[in-house]
Amino acid sequence: MRVTSVQLLMQDRGKEGNVRYALGMLDRCPESDLILLPEIWTSGFFCFDRYATESEPTDGPLVDAFRRWVRQRGCHLHMGSMVEREGDRFFNTSLLLDPAGEIIGQYRKMHLFGYQSLERRLLTPGNEVVVVKTPWGLAGLSTCYDLRFPEFYRKMVDLGVEIFLVAAAWPMARLSAWNLFNRSRALENLAFLFSCNCAGSDAGQQYGGHSALVEPLGNLIAEGDEGEGYVSAEVDFNIVRSVRRDFPALEDRVLP
């Protein structure tokens, strides 16, 4: 099956402009079974003054537009993340849609970023690991800063996850860490990892791009550059099971 990360170029188009732009990119995307978008692409991660005004519940017009698109295209879509509003609280929430346009996974980012960022001050952290059944195996949802916490991914593996899906707005300034964590989280858990990062910039912050499709031994299947584009490849999901069978490192863990 084909997996594609849509590495969006962030620009000041406004929320409605960003939604139209993303839908246009999806329309031109290679035919894929699973497509991924990045983190808070509707406004830009670093545009903190827009979080509250551009937030929506998950049954709002933003999600409805992508549910309609998915039903027309007939694929799974990891929508990236949005600022979700629930009452007087706000969350960094990513959604996984199935080909019927149903929300089959909803993950509220647990590790909120506080370094040179207002995310931790403005948003409420999630409190639940989210694992979703897909046609290719169990998928675990995660967002950007989560990558720095290996125990979070190990928890998902203990729940049977074989595929990690990562929405991100990772900055260029820490690109080397991004590249390392993408491969490390896949390798140490003998799992696929598919990430989608932003390109371009907003609020004076440059994004790193380099969205990645990584196989269970930590090798890159495909990787983006610093610009906008599609990171796409055919993936054989049987690999994760054969790797875990032939090199059963997860079974050799000794817990202190």
Image (cartoon, grey):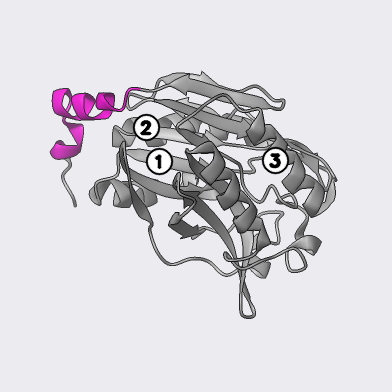
First along the sequence among labels 1 and 3: 3
Q: CA distance from mark 1 to mark 3?
A: 22 Å
Q: Are marks 1 and 3 in contact (CB under 8 Å)?
A: no
Q: Tell me which amino acid carries mark 1.
A: Phe
The answer to whether marks 2 and 3 mark residues whose Cβ atoms lie closer than 8 Å is no
Q: CA distance from mark 2 to mark 1?
A: 6 Å
Q: Quadrant of residue 7?
A: top right
Q: Going from the N terminus, do you reach mark 2 or mark 1 first?
A: 1
- Quadrant in which the N terminus appears: top left
Kind of residue indicated by mark 2:
Phe
Q: Mark 3: few, some, or many residues within 10 Å (few <14, many ≥20)?
A: many
Image location of residue 243, percent across then percent down: 22, 25
Q: CA distance from mark 2 to mark 3?
A: 25 Å
Q: Residue at x 38, y 23 (%)?
A: 235
Start-end of magenta stretch:
236-252
- Prevalent SS, magenta region: helix
Q: Which mark is residue 22?
A: 3
**Circle 2 sits on which residue?**
192
Rendering coords of residue 182 (x, y %): 47, 33
Q: SS of the residue at dot 2?
A: strand
**Where residue 114 is drawn, which disc sits there?**
none
Q: Residue at x 56, y 47 (%)?
A: 79
What residue is at 85 percent from the left and 45 percent from the top? 12
Residue 246 point in image, percent of width and height: 15, 23
Viewer can see residue 29: yes
**Residue linked to disc 1:** 164
Q: Are marks 2 and 1 in contact (CB under 8 Å)?
A: yes
Amino acid on which the number 3 mark rests in the picture? Ala
Q: Is residue 116 left or right of residue 49?
A: left
Q: Secondary structure at mark 1?
A: strand
| Disc 1 crowd, CA 10 A, few/some/many (<14, 14-19, 20+) | many
Residue name at image x 37 percent, y 32 percent: 192
